[in-house]
Amino acid sequence: MRALIFFILSLISCFEAIAGTRIKDITFPQGVRNYQLLGYGLVIGLQGTGDTLRNSPFTEQATMSMLDRMGINIRANAMRTRNIAAVLVTAELPPFAGWGSTLDATVSSLGDATSLMGGTLVMTSLSGVDGNTYALAQGPIAVSGFAANGQNETLTHGVATVGRIPNGASIEKEPPRPMGEPGLIVLELRNPDFLTSTRIADVINKFVGGHRRSPIARERDSRSVSVRVPQGDSPTKLLAQIGDLLVNPSTPARVVIDERTGTVVIGEDVQISPIAVTQGGLTIRVKETPDVSQPAPMSNGQTVVTSRTSISANEQNGQVATLAGPTLKTLVRGLNQIGLTPTGIISILQAIKSAGALQAELVIQ
């Protein structure tokens, strides 16, 4: 089964290499990014699942400040409500978003509230890293989890202290426009590689060459490609045209290992120099058997419980195999012939890397 999965993945990678990948899927224009927004607010209308004001003094202070702005002074009285919760509100402001557009907002509890279900976020300003307010969030919260408490049992499903407000934040200020050299677009590669950047520049120049134009693209380094906007064209139209061009990206030889889940991902160009590998396991079993020592009849002895220990050792026969991986398919076949578990494959790959036979980067997560 494991061999079939690796074989299918290798076929998919081969088909993708033949078909190519669109430029807009492996690059993005420099400066075009999302802006992170953050705000502090209050959620009201909770059914006794809010913050305990004694344990969360910031909730009480925020509530009093909000009521002061409304002309209500309760500072002389102690609040005992449990239907208010202090929250942090986060959102992502997309590039080129205009005034009046809406965003999804994420609401996360800050105090000891047990659930935000049924609550409503009071108007909260969302600011960027520069301190300016870019959006206002308000509205009912959609919570996917729930929590039910009793005297002797607690039932929870999902996370009840985090919710979302779909289209709950309205943009009040447009994000900063990316500033760059006029008439020049820089494409950033998501996976930097010198060969990929060169191929992107060649494909773009070949495309504009068919339209009787001089070359406009030039590879800058492994991470970026500069594209000059021809006179009379708009950057948006140019990006739309070159975004659908197909390129065969070059991927580095890399092996990624996740020891927590036993996942091993091997890149297409990974090679292993000829090497002999054996893998076996030593199992030691210790067994404790209680034994009762019964005294003879009519004696003054006492019954004593003793322990009888037996130790056995078993070592599996290790199979010696020769691995040489000029291609991914050959490497996978060689590992499967040894009959290894995911843990065994991880150990062998680490040992091969230490021996200097793994011609790839080994990434351990």
Image (cartoon, rainbow, N blue to C red):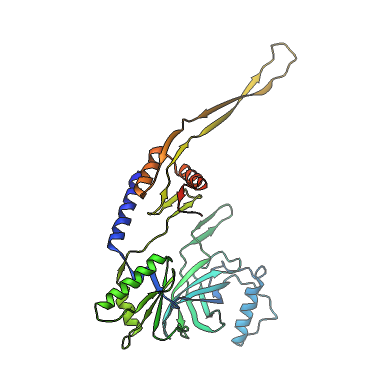
Residue 13 locus on image (x, y percent): 33, 56
Q: Give left or right: position of 198 versus 305.
A: left
Q: Nearer the viewer, residue 68 or 131?
A: 131
Residue 181 locus on image (x, y percent): 44, 84
The vertical placement of 312 against 19, above or below, is above
Q: Give the residue at x 34% y 82%.
A: 236
The vertical placement of 316 against 83, above or below, is above
Question: Which of the 4 image quadrants contains residue 59?
Answer: bottom right
Task: State whether residue 25 appears in this view.
Answer: no
Which quarter of the rendering shows the N terminus? top left
Q: Nearer the viewer, residue 203 or 76?
A: 203
Q: Give left or right: position of 188 versus 67.
A: left
Q: Residue furthest right?
A: 300
Task: State whether residue 274 appears in this view.
Answer: yes
Q: Give the residue at x 51% y 62%.
A: 159
Residue 245 locus on image (x, y percent): 29, 71
Marker count (numbered)? 0
Q: Nearer the viewer, residue 154 or 275?
A: 275
Q: Give the residue at x 59% y 54%.
A: 151
